[in-house]
C-alpha cells in the first residue's frame, strides 16, 4: 500500500517546508519520483505534517486496574492526540519486574494497542538479574519515592548496585520518601487539598533528584529525570550532562497551587503541582534546552475516585489525548514554535530511549505521522474523551491546533474523528548502544 501526501507543510528536523511524503510499505520516502504511482493521494493543503509524538511516561493500568484505563481505550486516546508510540510504566498489577511479565505485557500490547508500545522493566530491591540489556524494553524504571508493592527502592546500597551493575538507561520517580513521610505526619488529619503540595514538597523532589543525579554521574550511567516539577532541580540537571536528560509534563507547565481552588483533587499529582514561578522557570528550561522532553505521566483514575475527600483521593490525571494540542496551542499564542514542539515530543524521546526509526520525518523512517490543522479550534469536553475514565482537567478549555489524521506504521488509525479499530501498533526496537540523547544530537546512530 502506497499513500502519497501532497501539499503539506512538513516539519523536518532542521527545517519546515512544502514537500511530498510517500508512505511505502510502512516507511517514509521524502519527495518521491514524479513517476511514483500511489494507491491513494491525500491533498494536505493548509495542514502541517509532523512525526508522530512519543510519550515516554504513561500509566495505562493493564493488567490489574482496567476499571480506570486499559490499552484499547488509552491507545485510541493516543491516536486521537497524535501520539503514535507510548512507553508505559511497570507499576501495574502484577508489576513488570521479571522478564516473563515483560513478555506478557508486550503480548498485551500486540493484542490491544492501536499505536506502538513499549514497557519499562521495574527495579525492586531484589531483581537485579532481571535488569539485563534487551531490545524489547526502553529501560529501567526506579521509584525513589512512594510506589506500588515492593517497587519502592530507596536503600542506598541497592541503588548503587543498580546504577553500577546494569547497562540499560534508567529513569526514576524522584521524591524523597523520608521527607514525604515526615511532612505527611505534620499534616495528618487535614483534608485540605493544598497540603498535598506541602507534603510532596519542593524539597522532597530536590533531595531525591540530587541523589539520583549523583548516582548517574559517579557511575557514568545514562539517567532520565521524570516529571521535573521544581525550578530548583534544574541546577542539578544541566551540569550532569552528558549522562542526564530530563522531561516535564503539561500539568507542571500549566497548573500551579493557585489552581487547587478551582480544580481540587483533579490536579493532585505525584510529584505535586508547585508554584507559578516554577511554571515559568520550567517553561524557560524547555526553551533553553535544559529540559529535553515533554511527556504526560498519563495516570487515570475514575472521576468518583478522584472526587473523594483528600487524602483519600488518588494522585494522577489523564493527559495523553490532549498533550499535543496543548502545545500546539502554545504555538498559536507565540510562546514557542512548531519545530520546538516536534523536538520535545517526537525527536528527543526517540533519542533518549534509542528508539530505532522513529521521531523524525526522514527517508527510511517508520511512517508514524500526524497531520495537524494549526487553525482548528476545539473545546476539550469530558464526554468526548477516548480515555476510559472520560474526564480531563482541561475540560472546557478551547485550544487552537489539533490532529486531523494519524498514521501508525503507515496505516491510518485515526482520521477526522473516526478510528480504524483493526489496526495494531508494534513493539519498536530499542537500541541501547546508540549513546542516548547527547550522542544522537551529534548525528550518531540515527538509523
Image (cartoon, grey):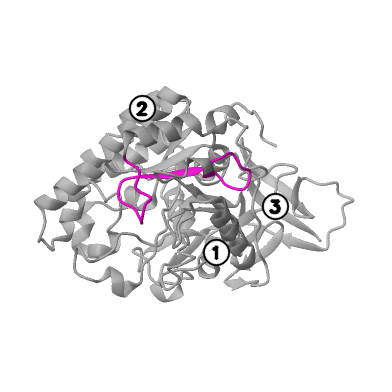
Which SS class for mark 3?
A: loop
Which residue was labeled with disc 3? 367
Please say whether residue 44 is one of the residues in the magenta stretch.
Answer: no
Give the quadrant of the N terminus.
Answer: bottom right
**Disc number at residue 75?**
1
Relative vertical location of residue 239 with respect to residue 371 in this rendering, above or below: above
Circles 3 and 1: CB distance less than 8 Å? no
| Pointer 3 or 2: first along the chain | 2
- Of badges 2 and 1, the one in the foreground is 2
- Tell me where residue 389 sits by quadrant: bottom left
| Pointer 3 or 1: first along the chain | 1
Q: Nearer the viewer, residue 340 or 307?
A: 307
Q: CA distance from mark 2 to mark 1?
A: 36 Å
Give residue 87's position: percent from left, percent from top: 52, 52
Q: Nearer the viewer, residue 74 or 256?
A: 74
Left or right, residue 277 beside residue 19: left
Q: Which residues are magenta?
A: 130-154
Which SS class for mark 1?
A: helix
Quick check: can you spot residue 367?
yes
- Tell me where residue 210 sits by quadrant: top left
Most common secondary structure along the magenta stretch:
loop
Name which residue lies at 71% across and 46% down: 19
Name which residue lies at 55% across and 69% down: 72
Which SS class for mark 2?
A: helix
Q: Nearer the viewer, residue 76 or 21?
A: 76
Which residue was labeled with disc 2? 214
Quick check: can you spot residue 202?
no
Give residue 275's position: percent from left, percent from top: 22, 46
Name which residue lies at 59% across and 64% down: 108
Amino acid at each position: 500500500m502506497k499513500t502519497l501526501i501532497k501539499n503539506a507543510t512538513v516539519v523536518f528536523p532542521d527545517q519546515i517546508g512544502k514537500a511530498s511524503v510517500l508512505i511505502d510499505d510502512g516507511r517514509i520516502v521524502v519527495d518521491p519520483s514524479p513517476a511514483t504511482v500511489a494507491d491513494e493521494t491525500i491533498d494536505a493543503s493548509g495542514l502541517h505534517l509532523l512525526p508522530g509524538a512519543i510519550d515516554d511516561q504513561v500509566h495505562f493500568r493493564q493488567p490489574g486496574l482496567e476499571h480506570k484505563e486499559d490499552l484499547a481505550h488509552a491507545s485510541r486516546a493516543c491516536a486521537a492526540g497524535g501520539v503514535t508510540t507510548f512507553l508505559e510504566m511497570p507499576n501495574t498489577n502484577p508489576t513488570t519486574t521479571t522478564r516473563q511479565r515483560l513478555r506478557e505485557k508486550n503480548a498485551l500490547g500486540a493484542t490491544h494497542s492501536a499505536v506502538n508500545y513499549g514497557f519499562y522493566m521495574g527495579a525492586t530491591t531484589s531483581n537485579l538479574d532481571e535488569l539485563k540489556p534487551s531490545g524489547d524494553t526502553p529501560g529501567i524504571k526506579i521509584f525513589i519515592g512512594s510506589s506500588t508493592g515492593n517497587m519502592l527502592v530507596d536503600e542506598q546500597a541497592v541503588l548503587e548496585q543498580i546504577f553500577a551493575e546494569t547497562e540499560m538507561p534508567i529513569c526514576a520517580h524522584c521524591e524523597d520518601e523520608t521527607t514525604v513521610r515526615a511532612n505527611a505526619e505534620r499534616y495528618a488529619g487535614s483534608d485540605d487539598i493544598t497540603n498535598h503540595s506541602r507534603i510532596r514538597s519542593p524539597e522532597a523532589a530536590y533531595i531525591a533528584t540530587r541523589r539520583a543525579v549523583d548516582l548517574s554521574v559517579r557511575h557514568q550511567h545514562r539517567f532520565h529525570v521524570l516529571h521535573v516539577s521544581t525550578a530548583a532541580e534544574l541546577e542539578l540537571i544541566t551540569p550532569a550532562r552528558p549522562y542526564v536528560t530530563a522531561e516535564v509534563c503539561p500539568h507542571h507547565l500549566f497548573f500551579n497551587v493557585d489552581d487547587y481552588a478551582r480544580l481540587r483533587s483533579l490536579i493532585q499529582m505525584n510529584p505535586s503541582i508547585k508554584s507559578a514561578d516554577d511554571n515559568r522557570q520550567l517553561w524557560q528550561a524547555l526553551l533553553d534546552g535544559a529540559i529535553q522532553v515533554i511527556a504526560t505521566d498519563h495516570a487515570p483514575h475514575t472521576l468518583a475516585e478522584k472526587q473523594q475527600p483528600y487524602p483519600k483521593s488518588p494522585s494522577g490525571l489523564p493527559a495523553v489525548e490532549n498533550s499535543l494540542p496543548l502545545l500546539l496551542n502554545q504555538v498559536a499564542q507565540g510562546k514557542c514554535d512548531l519545530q520546538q514542539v516536534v523536538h520535545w515530543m517526537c525527536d528527543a524521546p526517540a533519542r533518549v530511549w534509542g528508539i530505532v526509526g522513529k521521531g523524525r520525518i526522514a527517508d527510511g523512517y517508520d511512517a508514524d505521522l500526524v497531520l495537524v490543522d494549526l487553525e482548528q479550534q476545539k473545546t476539550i469536553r469530558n464526554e468526548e474523551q477516548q480515555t476510559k475514565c472520560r474526564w480531563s482537567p482541561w475540560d472546557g478549555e478551547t485550544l487552537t491546533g489539533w490532529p486531523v489524521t494519524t498514521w501508525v506504521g503507515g496505516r491510518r488509525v485515526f482520521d477526522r474523528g473516526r478510528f480504524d479499530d483493526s489496526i495494531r501498533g508494534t513493539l519498536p526496537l530499542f537500541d541501547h548502544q546508540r549513546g542516548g540523547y547527547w550522542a544522537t544530537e551529534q548525528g550518531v546512530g540515527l538509523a
